[in-house]
Amino acid sequence: MEPEAETPIQAEPQRTDPSTSGWWAAERRRLDRPSLPPAPIASSSHNATGTATLVLTGTGPEAGPSPALPAGAGSRRRRGWIWLTRLWALVKVASLVYTTWWAMGYLHAGLGTKLSAYGAVSLFAGFGARWRKRFFGPGQLIEPDLYEEVGRWLYRLGVALVLVGGAAVVAQYASH
């Protein structure tokens, strides 16, 4: 029985993998270096043993640093927007608090119910900051550690308010 001869693999037209090109676009945005080369073109080259190797063009140290922007220009530009993104997050939290205040006033809720409602809103915001990475707006992508900590504190505050509000409601009904 004769072993099958390896058939040469014909060169496929070069295609970029959408997930790879998306990753490179995200890296360019993260590094804030618009002069990075375009997404690398992945091509397969076959050597004498028939194994394929992946060659990425435009990567590695041969690509060199970007001459267009100085080293810290991107981070300085991002830091300039921090006050606006923090204001955005503050407005979002303030709108949550205001709508809770309005709803509880409309319902003529008692103290225990109001505390529980504010606790539920705090829990909502705390969970939102942990689960959705843009809950508080674009600043959450610039300063993820700060908003992670804010989410933790909102979660703790929410738990405490719900427990205290629940105890107040139970105490009110127990006294009747």
Image (cartoon, rainbow, N blue to C red):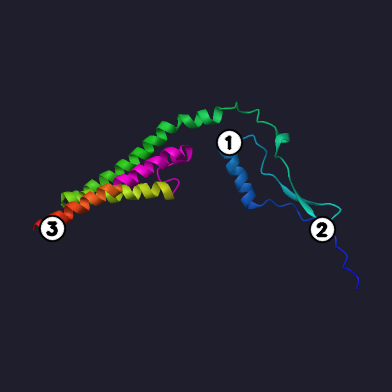
Q: Nearer the viewer, mark 1 or mark 2?
A: 1
Q: Let me know if residue 106 appears in the view.
A: no
Q: Residue at x 62, y 51 (%)?
A: 19
Amino acid at dot 3: Tyr
Q: Earlier in the sequence, mark 2 or mark 3?
A: 2
Q: Position of residue 170 (x, y in %)?
A: 17, 56
Q: Mark 1 points at which residue?
A: 31
Region of the chain picked out in magenta, as a range? 132-157
Q: Which residue lies furthest to the bottom in this view?
A: 1
Along the viewing direction, whichever of 47 and 160 lies nearer the viewer: 160
What's the mark number on residue 173?
A: 3
Pointers 1 and 3 in contact (C-beta within 8 Å): no
Q: Where is residue 156 in the image (x, y as percent from the top left)?
A: 32, 46
Q: Name the residue under label 2.
A: 10
Please indicate whether residue 112 sits to the left or right of residue 72 in the image: left
Q: For the residue labelled by badge 3, is the local secondary structure a helix, a strand or a loop?
A: helix
Give the position of the C terminus as an image quadrant: bottom left
Amino acid at dot 1: Leu
Q: Position of residue 139 (x, y in %)?
A: 44, 38
Q: Let me know if residue 102 appears in the view.
A: yes
Is residue 165 a member of the stretch shown in magenta?
no
